[in-house]
Amino acid sequence: MPTIELKGVSKFYGKLAAVDHVDLRIEEGEYITILGPSGCGKTTLIRMIAGIITPSEGMVTIGGKDMSGVPIEDRDIGYVFQNIALFPNLNVQDNVSYSPRVKGKEITEQDGISHKYLELVKLLDKMEMFPHELCGGEQQKVSLARALATGSKVLLLDEPLSALDARVRVDLRYDLRRLVKSLGITTVHVTHDQEEAMSVSDRIVLMKMGAVVEIGSPEQLYTKPQKIFTANFVGETNLLEGWVKSVADGITKIGLRDEAIVEVLNATFRPGVPVVISIRPEFVFPFTSGLHATISIITYMGTYWHIQALADSEDRVDFDVPISDGKLYSVGQEVYLMINKKAAVVYPRPIEGIAEAVKLE
């Protein structure tokens, strides 16, 4: 299976950089997700890989071959669009066998290819139906089967699940991962849905304003994000402003704005340095001592309560309480909150301020 490499790839529209000097290598058989807010350049990036858009600068290679000037039909890729694009006048089997037919393959081979991929997406029993007779999830599965039937070793997925209902999206993303990994296809998947990216990816490429912010496995970006933007965008987190008070025996003590002290492990900052603590809600616990806060919002999430509280330091602190604990909380209730010092990640406080550092545009 081919590798994909982007070397200094940019796309400018006048003075606007839709994509700004991106370097990225995607290994053979790897499932990469390009994640980011709307307008960050992720769709522009995948379309430059496909050859739909020509880069202003830089080079795209597939399998080590420079794709400059190579049209989309000659790049040996399968492409699944956000908007389901099937031929309405063709049934499911004919939609899937379209590429083999155009390539001049014998009818028996066309049928064999279409049957193979319809069986993979579990739609072989609906091959005589027309697109309008299928639900949205089934239509997108047909689109996927058609892309796979091209025989391409690279699959590009441009927001393939965004037009589907929430329940269908959840089911189909697992099918996507299962299919492409079983076939060993090099896959690039664009999405703005962080949960979708976390569930399907080998690695995630997080973008903001045309540039790559951070690249890593889902676990790396969630548990040990290198950038404060990543911590805030991938999952939910609490961001607490403070100053390093002391460092001793591997424990860093950080004072918040109300002089409350939070302890964290493995932070590498000197005393006096202004910092920001990132701590996920699942690692914040009601305790007999700690940060004093007042509960402002309680949200029932099925298996747990998601609770927002305002600390005396004026930081908002969210925490999760399993329903199985049997504990009841109320708005206006005062609580003490303790954080898991091993799970905290500490960043230097951004000069531009937290709000500016984590904004989406």
Image: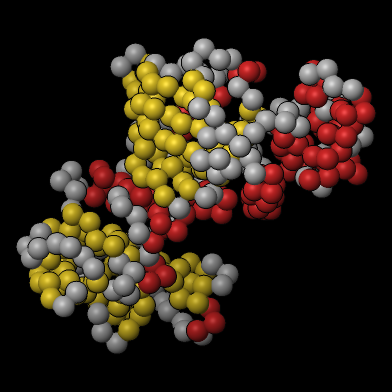
Viewer-nearest residue: 186 or 337: 186
Compared with 46, 172 (above or below) is below
Q: How is the image coloured?
A: secondary structure
| Residue 189 visible in the current orientation | no
Q: Tell me which residue sits at (35%, 34%) in the image.
A: 211
* Quarter of the picture holding the N terminus: top right
Viewer-nearest residue: 146 or 68: 68
| Residue 291 visible in the current orientation | yes
Q: Residue furthest left?
A: 272
- The location of residue 204, given as percent across then percent down, is 46, 46
- The location of residue 333, given as percent across then percent down, is 34, 78
Q: Tell me which residue sits at (38%, 32%) in the image.
A: 23
* Quarter of the picture holding the C terminus: top left
- The location of residue 100, given as percent across then percent down, is 80, 24
Viewer-nearest residue: 276 or 59: 59
Q: Tell me which residue sits at (79%, 39%) in the image.
A: 117
Viewer-nearest residue: 271 or 217: 217
Q: Tell me which residue sits at (23%, 68%) in the image.
A: 266
Compared with 15, 64 (above or below) is below
Compared with 76, 291 (above or below) is below
Q: Choose top left, top right, bottom left or bottom right for residue 321.
A: bottom left
